[in-house]
Amino acid sequence: MKEFLEKYKKVLRNLERAYVSSRYYFEEFFEDEVVEALEELRNLLWKE
């Protein structure tokens, strides 16, 4: 678990920021941040 958190710390933090801001206030994200986060999430969820 520690390795996982260290490896994906940036991605997890960006996903958390996106979730919280979408629910409670407005925050602007750059397209490259969103694309990177979605790609990493896709890789995590559908990893073979």
Image: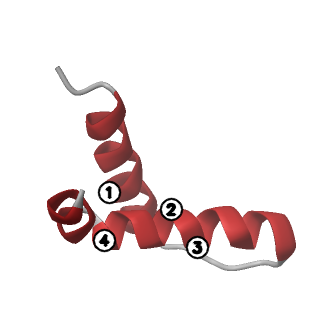
At mark 3, the secondary structure is helix
User: Where residue 12 appears, x then y in whole percent?
Assistant: 41, 64
Q: Does 43 sit above or below residue 28?
A: above
Name the one closer to the observer, 25 or 9.
9
Please identify the quadrant where the N terminus is shown. Answer: bottom left
User: Where residue 9 appears, x then y in whole percent?
Assistant: 30, 71
The residue pinned by badge 1 equals 36
Residue 17 numbered mark, or none: 3
Q: Which label's residue is closer to the chain start, 1 or 4? A: 4
Q: Do the residues labelled 3 and 2 touch (CB within 8 Å)?
A: yes
Residue at the limit of the structure toward the right, as seen here: 24
Judged left or right of residue 47, residue 39 is: right
At mark 1, the secondary structure is helix
The residue pinned by badge 4 equals 9
The residue pinned by badge 2 equals 15
Q: Nearer the viewer, mark 1 or mark 2?
A: 2
Q: Give the class, few, some or many, for how many residues have Cα within 10 Å of label 4's Cα (few <14, many ≥20).
A: few
Residue at the limit of the structure toward the front, as seen here: 1
Say which amino acid is labelled 4. Lys
Q: Which label's residue is closer to the chain start, 1 or 2? A: 2
Please identify the quadrant where the C terminus is shown. Answer: top left
Q: Does 41 sit above or below residue 47?
A: below
Say which amino acid is labelled 2. Leu
